[in-house]
Image (spheres, rainbow, N blue to C red):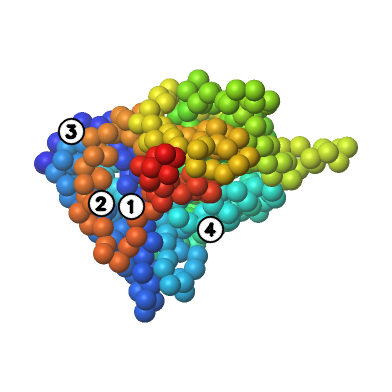
């Protein structure tokens, strides 16, 4: 595709392609024998991104003149383990024809305990935003603060992303460009924080003062409390940041951590996953699980009576939904795996089989709605198809792939779908 040809995707779709492609190392564990795992992982991420930018099919979608400004850079919290994985990934790219910079941030890596425990679920305490951004009000979760600090301190050839952006703008005499920060899942919370940090600290990245800032998070849980949301809404309203936050109505992740949204989680799939007969309350396990999420979030604040109160609030300005569709194929696969589990389980454990099956179905559906459902909902399926082909062609032999759906089911229920053979269960039930 000629560099000056018009891409078929609009600007928003182009931004989404980068926010998904930056997660190329997600779900992979790399052999770290000899301490080479991080270098192997970094090389793989760079190779995939290079092939994406050079792919003629993808160029027809997003344009042919995209160049890397910085990264992608992969961060791993523990580089001494026998096998390692990515905990955070970020990059920066520029298109002269669009006069657009995109800063994509990777979401939760399904096989990263650090992501799950230290960034996603570390919401029981808060950190003052002003202590990070230098100004502003409100608080963000300790997990969001941890992730943001990692991103701000990541370097490529000893240079941070913001310093590289500033140098690139100066060297190439770029004016009136837009800088779009985007990310999915965990990065749906981190990318708004990163954009707000940039807004609070323009001298670090906007040497001429002529660049404009935007944020395009998808499927993001809220990173902060009500005061933080109020401050962020005021920044958006003042046009300090152009903000577009989108999520799938059947995705449970963006329903965290605001109290009234969390409470909708247990029954979100009731139209398709019918609760066991006589269950009271009807979605007991998921209700208990969600209660735990509420109590975890409530630790972050107390009201004047000393009663824990969940302080988290979504940034509402610019937030919108897209209607999801229940994934019948994913659900059928789980049902097939566990069809005979009630017969195989011994004694009184049989009584728990319907609930176990429903929880596994719920977890599998939640994983699918948070991952594979998004490319078609965001109208980037053509990109996703080509992107997956590139991943398949480049998968390192020293890496191990983790399935996001099976990983989620195993973490929530303890059931390893990959280790269950439905046919074996059927034979055992005879």
Q: Residue furthest left?
A: 2
Q: Could you give the CA–CA distance between mark 3 and mark 2, rounded to whole angstroms?
A: 26 Å
Specify few, some or many for label 1: CA neighbours under 10 Å numbering under 14, 14-19, or 20 or more: many
Left or right side of 243 for 157: left
Q: Which residue is mark 4?
A: 114
Front residue (pair 30, 74)? 30
Compared with residue 286, is residue 175 higher up or lower down, i.e. above or below?
below
- Whether residue 140 is visible, yes or no, is yes
Q: Which residue is mark 3?
A: 6
Q: What residue is rendered at 37% in x and 57% in y?
A: 28
Q: Quadrant of the N terminus?
A: top left
Q: Mark 2 or mark 3, which is nearer the start of the sequence? A: 3
Q: What residue is rendered at 58% in x and 54% in y?
A: 117
Q: Could you give the CA–CA distance between mark 2 and mark 4, rounded to whole angstroms?
A: 24 Å
Question: Mark number for residue 24?
Answer: 1
Q: Could you give the CA–CA distance between mark 1 and mark 3, rounded to whole angstroms?
A: 26 Å
């Amino acid at each position: 595709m000629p560099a000056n040809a018009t891409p078929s995707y609009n600007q928003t779709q182009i931004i989404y392609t980068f926010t998904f492609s930056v997660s190329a190392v997600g779900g992979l564990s790399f052999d770290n024998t000899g301490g080479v795992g991080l270098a192997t992982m970094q090389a793989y991420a760079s190779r995939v991104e290079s092939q994406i930018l050079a792919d003629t099919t993808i160029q027809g979608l997003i344009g042919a003149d995209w160049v890397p400004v910085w990264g992608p850079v992969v961060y791993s919290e523990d580089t001494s383990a026998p096998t390692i994985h990515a905990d955070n990934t970020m990059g920066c790219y520029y298109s002269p024809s669009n006069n657009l910079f995109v800063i994509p941030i990777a979401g939760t890596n399904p096989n990263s305990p650090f992501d799950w425990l230290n960034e996603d679920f570390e919401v029981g305490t808060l950190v003052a935003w002003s202590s990070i951004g230098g100004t502003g009000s409100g608080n963000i979760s300790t997990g969001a603060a941890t992730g943001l600090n990692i991103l701000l301190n990541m370097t490529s050839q000893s240079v941070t992303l913001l310093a590289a952006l500033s140098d690139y703008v100066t060297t190439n005499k770029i004016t009136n460009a837009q800088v779009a920060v985007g990310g999915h899942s965990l990065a749906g919370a981190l990318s708004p924080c990163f954009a707000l940090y940039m807004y609070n600290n323009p001298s670090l990245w906007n040497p001429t003062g002529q660049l404009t800032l935007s944020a395009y998070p998808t499927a993001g849980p809220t990173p902060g409390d009500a005061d933080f949301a109020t401050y962020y809404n005021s920044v958006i309203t003042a046009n300090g940041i152009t903000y577009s936050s989108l999520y799938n109505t059947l995705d449970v992740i963006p329903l965290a951590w605001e109290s009234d949204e969390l409470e909708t989680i247990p029954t979100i799939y009731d139209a398709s996953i019918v609760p066991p007969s006589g269950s009271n309350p009807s979605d007991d396990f998921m209700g208990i699980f969600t209660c735990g999420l509420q109590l975890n979030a409530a630790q972050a604040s107390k009201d004047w009576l000393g009663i824990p109160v969940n302080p988290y609030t979504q940034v509402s300005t610019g937030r919108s939904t897209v209607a999801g569709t229940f994934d019948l194929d994913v659900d059928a696969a789980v049902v097939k795996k566990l069809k005979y589990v009630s017969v195989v389980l011994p004694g009184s454990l049989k009584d728990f089989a319907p609930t176990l099956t429903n929880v596994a179905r719920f977890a599998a559906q939640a994983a699918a709605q948070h991952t594979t459902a998004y490319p078609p909902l965001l109208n980037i399926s053509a990109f996703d198809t080509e992107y997956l082909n590139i991943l398949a062609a480049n998968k390192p032999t020293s890496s191990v792939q983790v399935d996001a759906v099976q990983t989620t089911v195993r973490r929530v229920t303890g059931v390893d779908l990959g280790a269950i053979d439905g046919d074996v269960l059927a034979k055992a039930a005879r």
